[in-house]
Amino acid sequence: MDPNRGQWELASRRGHRVVAVSSTSALSWRETVVNMWIEFRTHLLPWLLAAAVIGLMSYQEQRRTIRFNELLLRQAQAIEAQNNLLATQGYLVPPTLPLDELEFGGFESR
């Protein structure tokens, strides 16, 4: 009588595949490597790929934010230059903040 028979029957009733390996026989090296690859492929690889995708998306978002902040700074400089030109010609221009007081949210440009 096999002491693990009840556990195997329970696993087979739940729809699990039961592989009975006696203590005298062991898996070959190739079967062990194949099983390790299957475990890696089904359990770890999706998480590693998801982490890589999220890291890449985060990096691209950071670069996009830096470029957007640089664009806003160039636009603020152009508006300030235009306001200075209009002020020298005698036009009344609304007051603006100096460029060093402007704050853009997000990542700082490097």
Image (tube, rainbow, N blue to C red):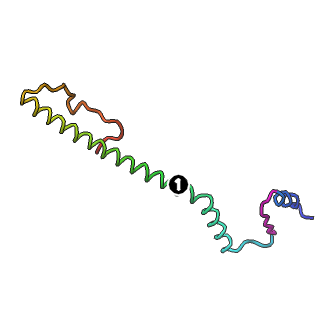
Q: Closest to the observer: 62 or 94? A: 94
Relative to 69, is 2 above or below?
below
Q: Secondary structure at mark 1?
A: helix
- Does the stretch in magenta take in 74? no
x and y, in percent, of residue 45 in the image:
57, 60
Q: Is 28 displayed left or right of 5 in the figure?
A: left
Q: Residue at x 52, y 57 (%)?
A: 49
Q: How many marks?
A: 1
The stretch of residues the image draws in magenta is: 14-22
Q: Residue at x 64, y 65 (%)?
A: 38
The residue wearing badge 1 is 50
Occupied quadrant, residue 78: top left
Q: Closest to the observer: 9 or 71? A: 71
Q: Residue at x 88, y 61 (%)?
A: 5
x and y, in percent, of residue 69 in the image:
29, 41
Image quarter hosting the C terminus: top left
Magenta stretch mostly in which secondary structure?
loop
Occupied quadrant, residue 8: bottom right
Image quarter hosting the N terminus: bottom right
Q: Which residue occupies the extreme left position in the image? A: 89
Amino acid at circle 1: Ala
- Does the stretch in magenta take in 17? yes
x and y, in percent, of residue 36 in the image:
64, 66
x and y, in percent, of residue 40 in the image:
61, 62
Q: Closest to the observer: 60 or 110? A: 60
Occupied quadrant, residue 71: top left
Q: Is 22 displayed left or right of 69 in the figure?
A: right
Q: Label 1 crowding class (10 Å Cα cut-off): few <14, some 14-19, many 20+?
A: few
